[in-house]
Image (cartoon, rainbow, N blue to C red):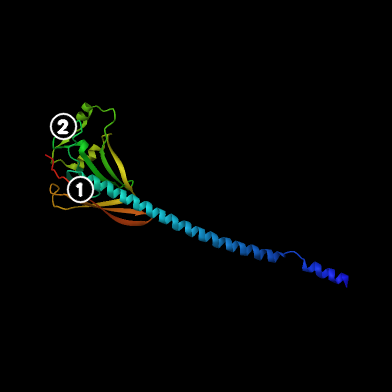
Amino acid sequence: MRLHNAKLRRRGGRGITLIEMLIAVSITAAAAGVVATLVSSTSTATSAQADGRRNLARIQAAKAIIGDELHNARAILASGSNYLIWWSGDNPVSAVTPNRAVNLSELRLLEVDTTTNELKVWAITWPDNYSASNIIAADTAYAANSNWYNVCQAAKNNANFTSAMIISNCTGMTVTLDASSFAASRMASCTLTITDQNITRRVLVSGSIRTAQWPE
């Protein structure tokens, strides 16, 4: 009888079998998979929201820059496929005497670089070591009837005519003016095509000239 009871006690205190261990491991792995999926989904959603906020901030910044530039311009000189050109007007603090003509330093080119898909604004930045006489000698004045697109493209050969990126992933721009002639135009509306993460957006950016003046 004692021997029989001892056998029963040994059977009741046996360890976990291999099958039971495999089942436990499988349940743990399944639970871990569910948790990992939830964490991944949450991370993806958070990342998408962050990207959306960044894209919105970039677009708003581009609108502010272009709107401010046009607001302070004096005349819209030319527009076409993927570009807009305007005159910033005579600069009263420049070394160059105000002449009511478009000088190189007063040209602004907004253009889509179709090679890098970047929207850029081009303008002159004189080196810090340029004296007033250097600026006067280098600041070319143009006739009012110049071909402004050709002027801007030629200006790119000048090391001081440099660009600043306004927004990336911009693949195109169309420009609409509020008048049939550049001299009469007071507002420009630019529709930007922006592609982010395979999503294409059309973004409208507009600006109006506060004080219009056609160059002489």
Where does residue 118 sit, x and y in percent of width and height? 32, 47
At x 32%, y 47%, the residue is 167
Distance, label 2 to label 1, CA atoms, is 28 Å
Q: Quadrant of residue 89?
A: top left
- Residue 199 is situated, as x and y percent measured from the top left of the image, at 36, 57
Query: Which residue corresponds to the image point at 77% horizontal and 68% vertical from the top-left?
Result: 12
Secondary structure under the numbered disc 1 in the rendered image = strand
Identify the residue at the far left of this view. Answer: 216
User: What's the amino acid at mark 2?
Assistant: Thr
Quarter residue 49 falls in: bottom left
Residue 120 location, quadrant? top left
**Mark 1 = which residue?**
79
Q: Position of residue 107 (x, y in %)?
A: 21, 40
From where the camera sits, is residue 120 visible? yes
Residue drawn at x 47%, y 56% is 43
| Residue at image mark 2 | 97
